[in-house]
Amino acid sequence: MDQLKNKTLQGLMYLGVGKGAGKLISFVNTLLLARLLTPEDYGLMAIVMVIVGFIGFFNEIGLGSAIKQRLDINQTQLNGCFTLALLISSALYLALYFASPAIASYYEHEVLTDVLRFIALTFIIGAIATVPDALIAREMRFKIYAGIEFVMILLQCAITLVLAWFGYQVWALAWGFVASQLFKTICILYFSNWRPSRFGNIGAATDLMKFGATVTYSRLTWYFYNNAKTLIIGKVLNPQQLGVYSMAATLAALPTSHITSMVIQIASPLFSKMQQDLTRLDNALRRLTSGIALIGFPVMAGMALTASELVPVLLGPNWLEAIFPLQILCILGLFKSVDPLITQAFISIGKANITARYTSLCAVVIPISVYFGAVYGGLVGVAIGLVISYPLSSIYLFYAARIHLDFSMRRYLKALQTPVEACIWMAVLVLSFHYASVHFGFDHLLWLLLGKTFVGLMGYLLFLVYIRQSGLRDCYEVLQELGVSKHKLQRWPFNRLKEQQS
């Protein structure tokens, strides 16, 4: 078996298990916290994380991505990157420390001053891990990543839940985040087996800085258009409405963020190793896109179809306003779950400037649509504005891919055909079950939630097994390449493939 392919599949397995277990724990923790914390607590934390996250992109100015993308790199350059990251992070911490009172005054919540200063410590914590983290990713040691992230999520959930129980409000979220980042950095340093041999050598990192600056700009604009809505909602509406939106966004992002981030984590070094063979890169791109869609699309569609029951059953009556935003964000998640692979492909072949143009476009179009949506339609207007503006902005991305990659829109849509058709079939069955249950008086929320979930799951799986088997065939090939014995793969549902061939 090809060594690169073997590492990729093993990486998917390790990260899939680790991130899956971690996200499940995080999801349960979110449900528990929803009953211990108020929407205002979530709203304040959302404001803090947007500000800290945006400034935090300057920590490494894309040095980590540059290290991963380079085919060859030496110790002198790594020393320069490490020193530069530390200097920049220290300057950013001091800047935010003195700016915090003004930010708190702008949002009329004095508690933001201390929370911002505390969470800003993660600038320095994260900078320390910049080089060793990139080296672990470059070597595709995903088993280590999976273990660290799982324990990190477990630690964050435990600290947050305990502090929320004792009434620490927004500080519970802050302490959980900082503690988890500190734990991650310590582990990355320990497992990377890399230490700076000396401080300085900033000049040696100049070439990496040039590439990293473009990547950083792309990430900044991406972060801006993804999080500007938080700042806009917090100012145009109020923290209560922002908390409702934040909870809807958190739920909608749980399945796609896990799956997409896992695949991107693997795709970054994988695409970099394929940068001189665009045909091979395109095949890998479509294969990974199909895999994301097969898993992510039914989850997003299922959450949208069950939102009216999911929110009151899991979160309680205080969060009913989150139903419609959750449904719209789940639909939007279908697009957002797959296009990051294309932007990553551009970065990996050294054309980060194309990604920068795309994110610049989004940074203009999306915030404008969110602002007018918030002013004229509240949270409903925000959701509608997003679901219109984001897909329209993606047109440029696909156009650029046709020119600079061995990319065909027909082949790309073909990779998405099976999961889209299966989701449509699933939606028909779920809606039919809903109307039939209500018609005959079985309208209890828990019954509808469980029933619709079961019908949707079975409908999707049976569609793949008996109607459109291309997705099932992909699963068979991946499991076979991971080392699963042919004897085990002769069982249902994979025996349907042989029956079809015969």
Image (spheres, rainbow, N blue to C red):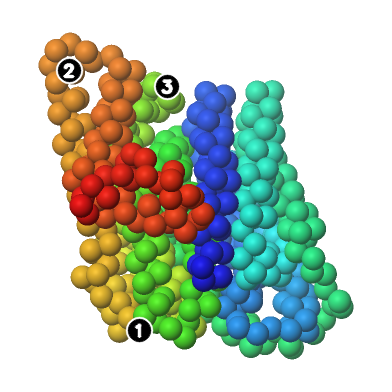
Q: Residue at x 51, y 71 (%)?
A: 2
Between 309 and 279, the one lying in front of the other is 279
Name above or below for residue 410 compared with residue 183: below
Q: Earlier in the sequence, mark 3 or mark 1?
A: 3
Query: Badge 3 local density, few (<14 within 10 Å), some, or many (20+)?
Result: few
- In this rendered view, identify the residue nearer to me: 156 or 261: 261
Q: Nearer the viewer, mark 3 or mark 1?
A: 1
Q: How many marks?
A: 3
Which image quarter: residue 432?
top left
Image coords of residue 440 (percent x, y):
14, 12
Residue at x-position 73% and y-position 88% = 204
Residue that badge 3 annotates: 316
Which tag, 2 or 1, sits closer to the chain's start? 1
Type of amino acid at the residue the image marks with label 2: Val
Q: CA distance from mark 2 to mark 1?
A: 52 Å
> Element under label 2?
helix
Q: Residue placed farthest to the right in the image?
A: 198
- Residue plotted at (19% across, 25% down): 434
Crowding around mark 2 (Cα neighbors within 10 Å: few <14, some 14 to 19, many 20+) is few
- Label whose residue precedes the other's in the sequence (3 or 2): 3
Amino acid type shown at disc 1: His
SS category of the residue bearing label 3: loop
Q: Residues within 10 Å of mark 1 (few under 14, many from 20)?
A: few
| Amino acid at circle 3 | Gly
Toward which corner of the image does residue 308 lie, by quadrant?
Answer: top left
Label 1 secondary element: helix
Residue pointed to by mark 2 = 438
Residue 292 lies, with reference to residue 490, above or below; the image says: below
Residue pointed to by mark 1? 404
